[in-house]
Structures are given as C-alpha cells and as structure tokens.
Amino acid sequence: MNIHENFKVLEVDLDGKKFDKVSRVVAHGDLYDFDLVLDVNVDLYPVQAGDSLSLTLVSTLNQDGSGMPVGDPGQQVYDPSVPFRSTNADDYEYVMFGKVFKYKDARRKGGSDTVNAEVFASFGGLLMHLSGTPDRLKELDVDQSLYLMIRKVA
C-alpha cells in the first residue's frame, strides 16, 4: 500500500486549541481532491495555515516493500534496526505509526450522488480523517497498520 498526496493546509485549530502540544490541521489535496483532518504534535513538527505538505501512507518502512516484523497476534512490533538503516521514512520530517479504525462510504456534502470514502486512523491517540474517492482509498482496511509520513514542500 502506498498512498501519496500533496496537501495545502487551510486551517489549524479551527475549533480552538484543545491541547498544548497538539494542533488539528485541516488540509485539502492538490492531486486527488482528498480532504484531511490530522492531529499533529506541533511541539515536534510545527504546522501553519498556508503550509504545503507532502503526505504518504505506507504499510511498511522497508524500501523493498517487505513487511515489518510481526508479533503475536499478528500485530506489528518495534524494529530496533530502523534508525540504523535506510527506510522509506528517510525523506520525510515527521513519521507516525498507527491503525485504521473505521472506513465508510458516504455521500458528498451538498446532496451530490457522488460517493466519498472516509478513513479514520489513530496514531497513538492523534487522529486522522481522510476522505476522497473510494478508488483512491481502497487499499486501506479496518485494523490495518500504517505509517504516515510528512514533509513540507515549497
């Protein structure tokens, strides 16, 4: 699985700041018309309205596409070799590991008949809501582990 999109940050903390070190980012995709709401630890990775972000979702950090180590019962486990070898995360500034907890199809706002897929994931309590066309998000499933990688672009 590899989903990539370039986003323009539209707003940060639209409903006010809830936590000192976390901001909720609202962004819109340039390539595939994705809409994104993402909690970001701004103490580690400051984000402001107007920033352009390159975001990639992958199921593994291994450059050859092979799976990450799996523990019991089938859950990915920490791989202590990651900081000491080349990975997909090397070209990114902010990386989170999480799990998809909800996937649904919904109608677009405004009464259109166009179906929109919505994916909800949690990265240790930091939430992501990604919506777009089902054909672009079909690689994501409930209970799937994933890595979210972000870098700022000009």
Image (spheres, grey):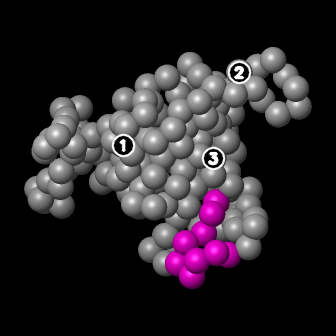
Q: Identify the image quadrant of the N terminus.
A: top left
Residue contact at pointers 2 and 1, CB within 8 angstroms: no
Drawn side of residue 35 relative to residue 41, left or right: right
Query: Which sits earlier in the primary sequence, circle 2 or circle 1?
Result: 2
Q: Which amino acid lies under the numbered mark 1 shown in the image of this protein? A: Leu
Q: Identify the residue at image location x=26%, y=44%.
A: 61
Q: Position of residue 142 (x, y in %)?
A: 43, 34
Tell me the magenta residue range.
Answer: 17-25
Q: Of the numbered discs in the image, which one, if any, rests on residue 115?
A: 2
SS of the residue under disc 2: strand
Q: Secondary structure at mark 3?
A: strand
Q: For mark 3, does the 10 Å Cα neighbourhood hold few (<14), some (14 to 19), or many (20 or more) residues?
A: many
User: Residue at the location (37% across, 37% down)?
Assistant: 143
- Mark 3 or mark 1, which is nearer the start of the sequence? 3
User: Label 3 belongs to which residue?
Assistant: 36
The residue under label 1 is: 146
Q: Dot 1, how many residues are within 10 Å of its Cα: few (below 14), some (14-19), or many (20+)?
A: many
